Every structure is written in structure tokens, then in C-alpha cells.
Amino acid sequence: MENKNITTNLLIKQMLQSDAIAYNADYVAKDIDMEFGVLNKAYQDTGREYAKLKINIQKGDCIEEDCAYEYNRIIQLEASPKLSLDFLSNITSELAVTETPNYDPNNYYGFMVANCILTKKPGFSKTDGYDISLSLLSNGTQQIVFTGPAFVKPLSINSAALSTLLESGTSLVADTPNIDQSMNELLIETGIFSPDMVGENKKLSAGAKLSEEFILKFNGKPDYEIIDIGEGKGRNILRYDLDKIAKKVEPFINAEVAGILSAEQEAIAAWNVFLSKGTSVEEDDQMVQNANAGSDSWSYTEDLPLMQDKKVLFAEKYKIYFFKNYLTQFITNKLPSVEEDAAVFDLEEGRKAKAQQFVEGNQ
């Protein structure tokens, strides 16, 4: 079944990244109206209403004897301009998430369309059939409505509802957490690297190596695996105690996962964009084209709140992703620090020596 959010979001993204519209002679020649005049339309009648309320109070010609309605409405109108600016600022900030590099295309596609209208992207003008209207409601709240051909139904957002979401720590549009930053920080926080491997910028230095304690030993010396490098030659590479590394790392991963799961909509974004398929960082760079999770995506409307089985699965996949994309590079094909052990040798002789060493070590 086609996921309309994925297909529409990716289609718009592709369209915006293309220069094709600049070579469309009909579009270039068209008189484009990009001025929606949101505030002008919203406030065009408020001056008259304000004046009428004032006059009614002065004359005592109010709906009720104490003019409570009129006084309350005047307070609402006086507060409206600041509320409008704050409301539009919040909406602009929320919709801007659709332009972030790892934006999850499983978000409702109307958010990306609304952002295109608000930021005056080509193809989303009044001339193209799009519009924005802001209404000052009688209860003091405000309503913004985005309309146009791409919407099945208008996107309507209330100022009070949005404020409530933001104040509770929830977002209108799910932002994808920076997994790369988090996992690079995890590498350091776990303590599997000695302090001298971490620079002043709190990042691993070039050539950083795991602490010696994680290297497997045989008879008190580093244990090596012999690899075939061709032409009858071999080389030693270090063997690491993967169980010991896992035990050291796991509590830190669990704490990180718990933090992400505390904002469940961001956890869904991380699942959809990074974790679901267990891909590599390089493959995830193609997310915009491939929409990583695809049919395995979790839904913001159907899967929130997350059930325990999904939380467990998230933790498992997060650990796999960390080991595959961030830890593996430090334990794969690492040469010994002892110069003579790092030298190239005859493969057959090296294997015999290794076998003899094993026999002698177990006598």
C-alpha cells in the first residue's frame, strides 16, 4: 500500500532540489503573486470593531449592564497583535523542521506543503492556488489555515492548541534526533578509550585506539588473528574481547535510548530514518531517495504511545546500529602496536607458529 506521506514529501523535496523550474518558460513568464497578506487580512476589520466597542462602553450601550463582554473583547483585541506574532513565529519554527537534512518523510506531508507556502517556494504561490488565512476567534485564540491543490483538506492550526503542545514538550512536526552526534559522544562516554585519545574539543583524536584492557591476551601477551593479504603473505591483527566491550558499553546505550524514548515522536523519527533497516551511515545518506524504513515505518498517528515491544525493539536496533557504524571501525583489522608483530610474514610459517604457540600455551 502506497504511503502518501512518503511519496508526497519526497516528491516535493526532489522538486525543490531541482533547477528544472528555472527552465520552464511558461512559469518564468507567469505573473506570480506570492503576497498572502496574512496579517493585513486578519486585522482589516479590527479597527472598526475596537472603535465600536469603545463607543458602546461610553454610551452604556452594551450587551450586558456591566459591559463585561465589551471590556473582555477590547483586552483580547489589544493582546492580539503580539499573539499573532508569537503564533506565526511558532508555526514558522515548527514547519522549518521539514527542511532539515534527516527529516522523516513519514510526517504528515501537509506540513511540508505549508512550509513551502509560508517560505514562498516556487510552485506554491497564490497564483498556483495556495493561500494562508489567519482568523481572530471570539474566544481570544487564533486560527491559521493553509489551503491549496496539494491538500486533501485544509491544514488548520489553533494558537492555543499549538502553545499547549509546545509547553508540554511535544512538537507539531517530529524532528529527527542527531544520531551521529549522539553515537560519537557515546564512544567517549563509555570509557572504552583512554583519556589521552580525546581532544580538547571533546572528540576522538585521529588514530584513536581502544584501551589495552579490551585486547584479548594469550599467556599475558596480545592475541592475534592472522589474515591473508595475498601472494602467500600474512599479517597479524588484534583480537578484541567483544563480550567485555559489550558489557562496558551497554549501560551507556541503555541510558541514551531511555533519553530518546522519553520523546516518543523523536524515537519514531529515529526509527524511520536510521534504525529500522539496520543500514550503514553511507546508506542512510540516501534516505531522501529511499525513505529508509519504507513499509516498516512506524506511524505518528497509529503507533503513539509506543508499546513496550516497540521500545525493546528500538533499544536492540539502536545497539546494533552503534556497533555496526561507530564501534566496528575501532576493532576491525587493527595492527599490533609492537613493531615486529605488525610486520608482514610468510603466511604458512605464521600459521604453523600460531598453532605451535597454542599447543605450548595449553600444555
Image (cartoon, helix red, strand yellow):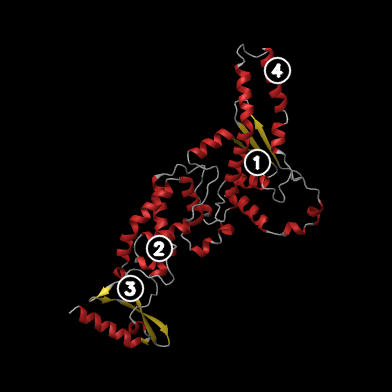
In the rendered image, residue 272, in percent from the top left (x then y), is placed at 50, 53
Q: Cα distance, mark 4 to mark 2?
A: 72 Å
Q: Which residue is mark 3?
A: 239
- Front of the two marks 3 and 4: 4
Compare residues 264 and 84 and report the one nearer the observer.
Answer: 84
Seen at 35% across and 65% down, the residue is: 195
**For mark 2, does the 10 Å Cα neighbourhood hold few (<14), some (14 to 19), or many (20 or more) residues?**
some
Please tell me how crowded label 4 is: few (under 14), some (14-19), or many (20+) other residues with Cα within 10 Å.
few
Q: Amino acid at mark 2?
A: Phe
- Does 360 sit above or below residue 188? below
**Left or right of residue 218: residue 295:** right
Q: Which residue is mark 2?
A: 323
For marks 3 and 4, the one nearer the N-term is: 4
Q: Is residue 277 left or right of residue 123?
A: left
Separation of marks 3 and 2 at Cα, in angstroms? 16 Å
- Whether residues under marks 1 and 4 lie with C-beta atoms below 8 angstroms apart, the answer is no
Mark found first going from the N terminus, 2 or 1: 1
Q: Which one is earlier in the sequence, the residue at label 3 or at label 2?
A: 3
Q: Position of residue 48 (x, y in %)?
A: 73, 25
Residue position for label 4: 55
Q: Disc 1 on helix, strand or loop?
A: loop
Residue under numbered circle 1: 152
| Residue type at numbered disc 1 | Val
| Residue 104 percent location from the top left of the image | 55, 51
Q: Is residue 302 left or right of residue 190?
A: right
